[in-house]
Image (spheres, rainbow, N blue to C red):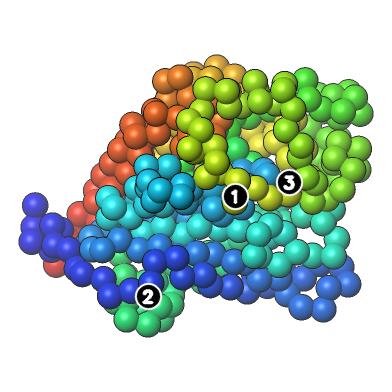
């Protein structure tokens, strides 16, 4: 390995957890201003010569805090962000449009996954460009070889898949707790009647989302059946308590699409970059071995099943294996892609 490939550069960044508001260029209906996306940049102590940015999109009912769960005792083992920065990766926590500190449009029914994907891509591309040329954060050196990986959980994975299919935003994607089989048993009858007719379903999506949730930014109330669905009864209590600040409304239109069988199957089938699939053994996505079959254009896919873990992966002991496997996967292919330029330097 060359000296350039193995070198690391100390970072002199802004404080961990710097929140930025980035213009998406999206304006909906009668809204006067374009919507802004709230993102939180967390940086490692040292940045490698083949830097990787993990762009983390939370699932339905969660804001960006899902990726940075912090119990009162300071335990960082539940924080995906802390675990990844400790391994040398940059992390960008994203509040999707309409959630958390991101702007919320007046018409939430207009937030189809493709609309969200276009808005998110515009903002995230601006962040990546600013990191590559050194203009984003004062004191942080330019990272011209930076590669981004889209990391999504549940509904966030659906949004990451749609974004990648439409814009090829990232060098790879990590899909956590998501599959294209959907949750048909939980759909309202009007939506369930359209199973097998994806085109008709998509045409009627806002209407069906209204029937499913009643409001575009819906608040879900936990129930005993949903607790079983998420395998939460097996989760660690300290992690469960740390999850509370991450609670947020659900983007009803996207969530309805996520529940439909074949939800984003065409988009998944078009993705050719490396894909990491992480799913709990007790997850709600069905048989884990079915998920890779959705990515028919991908020739570099890694499936990692978390033993005895439910849907919110970071609340279970198997999270430690996920952290190591995902970080190693991201760093390995980033280093491999950077190697040719290093050999000619």
* SS class, disc 1: helix
Q: Is residue 215 above or below residue 138?
A: above
Q: Position of residue 168 (x, y in %)?
A: 52, 53
| Residue drawn where x is 14% and y is 67% of the image | 345
Q: Residue at x 36, y 59 (%)?
A: 90
Q: Which label belongs to residue 250? A: 3
- Neighbor class of circle 3 (other Cα within 10 Å; few <14, some 14-19, many 20+) is many
Q: Earlier in the sequence, mark 3 or mark 2?
A: 2
* Side of 105 relative to 124 (left or right): right
Residue at numbered disc 2? 14
* Secondary element at image label 2: loop
Q: Nearer the viewer, mark 3 or mark 1?
A: 1
Q: How many marks?
A: 3
- Which one is in front, 193 or 183? 183
C-alpha gap between disc 2 and disc 1 = 23 Å
Quickly name the residue at label 1: 246
Real-space CA distance between mark 3 and mark 1, rounded to the nearest whole angstrom: 12 Å
User: Is 53 left, or right, of 31 in this rendering?
Assistant: left
Q: Measure the alpha-carbon separation of dots 3 and 2.
A: 31 Å
Q: Secondary structure at mark 3?
A: strand
Crowdedness near tag 1: few (<14), some (14–19) or many (≥20) residues, C-alpha within 10 Å: some
Horizontal and vertical percent position of residue 250: 73, 46
């Amino acid at each position: 390995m060359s000296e350039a490939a193995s070198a690391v550069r100390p970072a002199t960044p802004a404080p961990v957890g710097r929140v930025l508001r980035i213009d998406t260029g999206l304006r909906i209906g009668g809204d006067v201003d374009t919507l802004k996306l709230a993102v939180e940049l967390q940086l490692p102590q040292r940045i490698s010569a083949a830097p990787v940015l993990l762009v983390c999109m939370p699932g339905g009912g969660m804001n960006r805090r899902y990726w940075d769960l912090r119990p009162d005792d300071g335990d960082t083992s539940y924080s995906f962000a802390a675990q990844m920065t400790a391994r040398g990766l940059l992390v960008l926590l994203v509040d999707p449009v309409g959630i958390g500190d991101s702007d919320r449009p007046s018409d939430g029914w207009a937030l189809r996954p493709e609309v969200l994907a276009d808005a998110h891509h515009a903002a995230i591309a601006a962040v990546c460009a600013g990191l590559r040329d050194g203009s984003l954060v004062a004191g942080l050196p330019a990272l011209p070889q930076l590669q981004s990986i889209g990391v999504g959980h549940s509904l966030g994975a659906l949004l990451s898949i749609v974004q990648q299919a439409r814009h090829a935003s990232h060098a790879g994607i990590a899909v956590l707790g998501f599959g294209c089989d959907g949750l048909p048993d939980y759909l309202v009858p009007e939506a369930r009647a359209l199973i097998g007719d994806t085109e008709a379903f998509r045409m009627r999506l806002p209407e069906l989302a209204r029937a499913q949730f009643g409001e575009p930014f819906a608040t879900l109330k936990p129930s005993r059946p949903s607790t079983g669905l998420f395998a939460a009864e097996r989760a660690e209590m300290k992690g469960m308590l740390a999850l509370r600040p991450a609670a947020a409304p659900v983007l009803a239109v996207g969530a309805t699409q996520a529940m439909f069988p074949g939800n984003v199957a065409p988009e998944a089938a078009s993705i050719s970059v490396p894909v990491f699939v992480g799913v709990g053994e007790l997850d709600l996505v069905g048989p884990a071995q079915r998920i890779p079959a959705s990515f028919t254009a991908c020739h570099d896919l890694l499936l990692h099943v978390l033993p005895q873990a439910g849907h919110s992966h970071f609340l279970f002991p198997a999270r430690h294996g996920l952290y190591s496997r995902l970080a190693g996967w991201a760093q390995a292919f980033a280093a491999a892609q950077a190697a040719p330029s290093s050999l000619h330097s």
